[in-house]
Every structure is written in structure tokens, then in C-alpha cells.
Amino acid sequence: MKKLILFSLLILPTLSVKAQAPILVTPQWLNDHRNDPAVVVLQVSYLQLEYDGEHIPGSKFLWPEWLAPNSPKGNFNAPDVKQTTTLLESLGISNNSHIVICYTSNQVSVAARMFLTLEYLGLRGHVSFLNGGLDAWKQAGFTVTKEPSTVKKGKLTLTPDQTIVDKDYVLKNLTSTSTIIVDARMQKYYDGEPTGYPRDGHITNAKNIPYTEMVDAANVFKPVDQLEGYFTSVAPDKSKELVTYCFIGQTASVVYLAGRILGYTMKLYDGSLQEWSRIDELPMEMTKK
């Protein structure tokens, strides 16, 4: 009996984090769990100087291009699994870790892409998103630091899933009864306002959920009941899969994350209109006025 009790105590912290960790977490939740050895906070920023200037104590710096590199094939690609495994292990991430994504100022969309990519890599259920990011953390009265964080190398196995899809998948599902294609751009671009891309408008039959409507002026995700309104008008029930896209696969990640918060099955067309609009045989249309 004594051995059983000791074993239960040893595994309790990890189990409690996983059991209590929603997709969207508050600063209070993170502060309550920050010292749990299973929790790894990654602060996303395009420039390391922002992280060096201030970050949540113990958090690690995550440069977006490590998980969504640009290439001649387009912007924001899926990363190489072997290289990413090495990277994430160097940030202290192991198979039993629970990752919390933090962002600075207005970088909510790129941080959402980091969340999406980690889920794509097989870490679904092991990733949360700090609502409001670093600004919300500071506004809640919690401390920040300039001190470097110590890292104990992790041990991780990544197994990518079907979260990120290609143009062929989208084309095959344009008239599907089980899949809805969702344009995450602002409505004016969905309708057909010129963007500088070879073709304007939206993918034929796609619906519109603007990513800008998912968050408020402070880049905080809106309450669930408000998010539901945008999704139920497009997908009245949650039995259908939603595949979202945008210009390059970045801002669509905000809609992806909102859908995951609501319990929808979400995917991302990574090539988005950067690719689709350049291939003439792929159908596009404008909103009829």
C-alpha cells in the first residue's frame, strides 16, 4: 500500500496538469501551474530582443520560422520533423510535457500558427494558448524577467498527423457534405477586393469566418458564446470538418484555434491563396453583389 501511495504522489503533478489544462488558459491558470515540471512556456516573437527584454520567468524563446519556415515553395511551411524534434528537445520538451504558447503585443496570429504546428506534429492535448499573451500576464500583476531560463534537455517523439492539408485535399472536398472550406481573411478580400495576388475572390464554395473577429482590440480571444456565433452560421453542428485558409497560412491559424476551442474538427490548407490563386485550373469566385 505504501508503494502504491508513493507512486500516485509521484505522477499526480503531470496528471493534474493534463486534466486541468484547457486549450485556452488564463494568466492565473499559468501562474498556478508554472512551477510544475511538466509545464513548458514558449514565448513567440519574431525578434529575440523582445524576449530578452522581458519574458515570463522560466519561459523559453520560440522564433516562428523554426516551426513554420519559409521556402521557395511558399511562406509558412510545415517543418522538418527530425530538425524540429531536436529543437523542441533543446527547449526542454519531452513526451509528457504540457506546452503553453505565449505571445507579445499583436503577434497573436503567428503564435496561433505555432499552436497549430505543434498539434500537427502530434502534440494535440499537450498544448495550450495563453489568452492575451504577455500583456495579459502583466496586467494580471504577475512578474516578468530578463534573466535567461535554464533548460534541461527533453526527450521527444513526434508523429505528424493530417492537420495540415494540401491543395488536392481542398479540391477533393469542395463539394463534400462532410467538409467545409473556410476563408479566414477579412470579408472585403473574401468578396473580391484586389490583393495583388494573380486572382481575387475566394476558393469556390468557401465560407467566410474573418480571423479579425476572433479576438478583441487587445488581441484576447472573445468569449465562447461570441465565437460560437461566427461558427454556427457556417457550420450549425460540429459533425463537419472545417478546413481554413488565408493568404499564406498564418492568420487562418487564428480561426483554426478558435474552432479548436469550440470543439470543431479543424484543418489548415497551408498553401492558401498564395498557391491556389496562381494555379488557373483551381476554381475561384467573387461574391455576387
Image: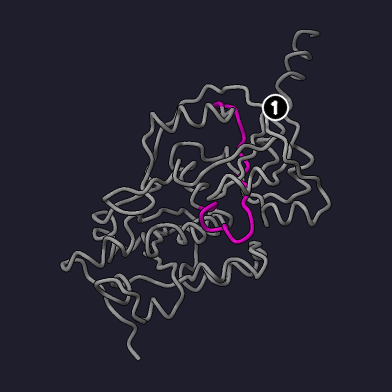
Residue at 75% over, 49% down: 27
Q: Nearer the viewer, residue 202 or 82?
A: 82
Looking at the picture, does residue 184 appear above or below residue 27? below
| 60 left or right, relative to 86 | right
Q: Nearer the viewer, residue 42 or 176?
A: 42
Q: Position of residue 145 (x, y in %)?
A: 75, 41
Q: Position of residue 261 (x, y in %)?
A: 58, 55
Q: Say whether residue 171 is magenta.
A: no
* Residue at numbered disc 1: 37
Q: Residue furthest left?
A: 281
Please identify the quadrant where the N terminus is shown.
top right
Is disc 1 surrounded by few (<14), some (14 to 19) or many (20+) residues within 10 Å?
A: few
Looking at the picture, does residue 57 appear above or below residue 68? above
| 270 left or right, relative to 153 | left
The region drawn magenta spans 94-112
Q: Say whether residue 111 is magenta.
A: yes
Location of residue 37 (image quadrant)? top right
